[in-house]
Image: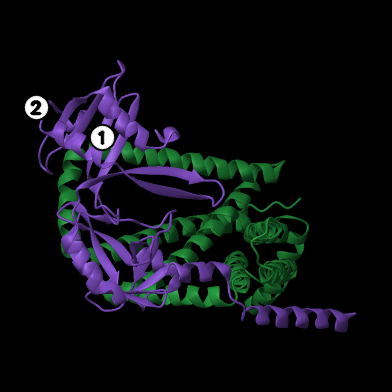
Amino acid sequence: MKRFIKLICAVLVVLTLCLGLCSCKEMDEIREKRAEWGDELMTVIRFDGKEYKLLSPCEDLVVDLENGNNYRYVTLEEVPLLLTDQFGSIIKISSDREMIVCGHWQNDYECNKVYARSDLYEELEEAIENYELGWLCYQNNYYDYETQEFVTERILMPEALNEIVNKASELEGMILDEDDLPYGSSDVTLYFCDKSMRFVRENKYIRFTKDNFGKWYMIYRRAKDMEWVGVEISQEDINVLLNAIPKDSM
Amino acid sequence: MVRKLLKHETLAFGRSMLPMWVILLGMSVFARIVQFFESDSTVYDIVRGSAFTVFGISVAVCLVMTVVVCIKRFYVNMFTGEGYLTMTLPVTAEQHIFSKLLISVAGFVASIIVVLVALCITSLGEVLVEVFKAIGYLFDKMYQQIGFHSVVFIIEFIIILLVLAAYQMLLFYGCISVGQLARKNRVLAAFGAYFALYVIEQILGTIMVIFVSLQMNWLTSLFEKLELYAIKHPYVVAHGGIWIGIGLYVVIGAVFFFVSRYIIKNRLNLE
């Protein structure tokens, strides 16, 4: 009996030691989400076998990012896996995996450092210098029950809406208190972007809001440090917007 | 004689705790083996969750049992029928209390070590390696920030743990000894003594707070001086504070020690 018990214990010990050689799912997941700085100046990121180089300094610019809560972390190589989120900076990957965005604080504003994949560096450098944010896009955020992740769908607004916005911006309008901006029974927010929607300026946006009497207003700010202005929009003009966005997204 | 006392105390403690430790290590092996079958299925999640819940409960039970066994050893050995035999030994009351205290603290440390070994078994493999890497990295960072003081803080932390363990045991010994002064329901009286001590502690704490708030003007200037000194010599203040705390617990523990000793020496009345 004693021999039998000793044999069982020996088998369990050997099995446990052998199991020590197996990998662990959680460790693999952390490894997948981890990127590493390629140099001490933090101008290069190594992720998924590719290198990404710093493209631009601080900009209040956001690229079209991957869907879902896909935060990743970039750390120095010496930082252990389990401390990745403690000693790392959060990064997000663009949906086409061409760019990485790393947020950091500068002068009390959160800015983005954009890193481009090294094989597309020159092309993206030119695109960032030459993009024009003359278009508007709508961000439809919803939860996809099939994939079980949050999805952001960007829809480019028609050119006719750009003209409506430009015309309304030239009107006098009411000055609004930034801390008490009105929110109506319906609200639609549009962001400035380039025509391909590759680059979106999330800090500059226009909001259309409907008050309790059914009137629509456009609320916007002409420049970063200027006041908020509210301008009434006609129903005919608003229909251009409402026809362009999904009906159940408001 | 004291060495023999310690030897028999250790054997008695081991007889009680060894099965618990074996069960705990067994649960850790089971939890590790379950992880071998890892998959995305719900069944695996349930089994794994259950294995870790059972392991967690085993850890808690092991630690609680350690304290219970230590208290029970003291009570049974000194104040029940066994006490007649114990008191015939050529050993003083201080030596009795001291040997039991030493084995209790050592037993608690042994239980902690077994729990840590069990945790290591549960995470054996890549996770364990990463845990040690993370601990080494954090210690390295701490050493870079505060230098040699990091080592001193760790040593002080270990000393605090040992002193607190000893203090807690002496508190229990003191309450059990005070409970023996009652004629009937001595165990209940021991609980009553513990509760009364807790109430007295709270009252004294409240009186201190009231005293401090009434003496605010005088104390404000003292605190300001202390603050300025702490800014210039932060580590002196930190280490000083820790050692004052240790000293306080040693003094209070010594009070309970002498209370237990007095009652065992002069007021023992075995049933």
Q: Amino acid at mark 2?
A: Glu
Callout 2: chain:
A
Left or right of A197 in this view: B20: right
Nearer to me, B60 or B203: B60
Tell me what hue chain B is rendered in: green
Callout 1: chain:
A
The residue that mark 1 highlights is A207
Residue B202, picture quadrant: top left
Residue A172: mark = 2
Residue B191, horizontal then vertical, whole percent: 62, 44
Nearer to me, B108 or A152: A152
Image quadrant in which the N terminus of chain B is located: bottom right
Mark 1: which secondary structure?
strand
Residue A94: mark = none
Pick whichever of labels 1 and 2 is earlier in the sequence.
2
Classify 10 Å Cα crowding around label 1: few (below 14), some (14-19), many (20 and above): some
Colour mode of the rendering:
by chain
Residue A247, horizontal then vertical, whole percent: 43, 33
Residue A78, horizontal then vertical, whole percent: 36, 78
Q: Are marks 1 and 2 on the same chain?
A: yes
Q: Amino acid at mark 1?
A: Arg
Q: Is residue B79 above or below residue B30?
A: above
Residue that sits furthest to the right in the current view: A1
* Residue A150 in sight: yes
Residue that sits furthest to the top in the current view: A213
Left or right of B234 in this view: A29: right
The purple chain is: A
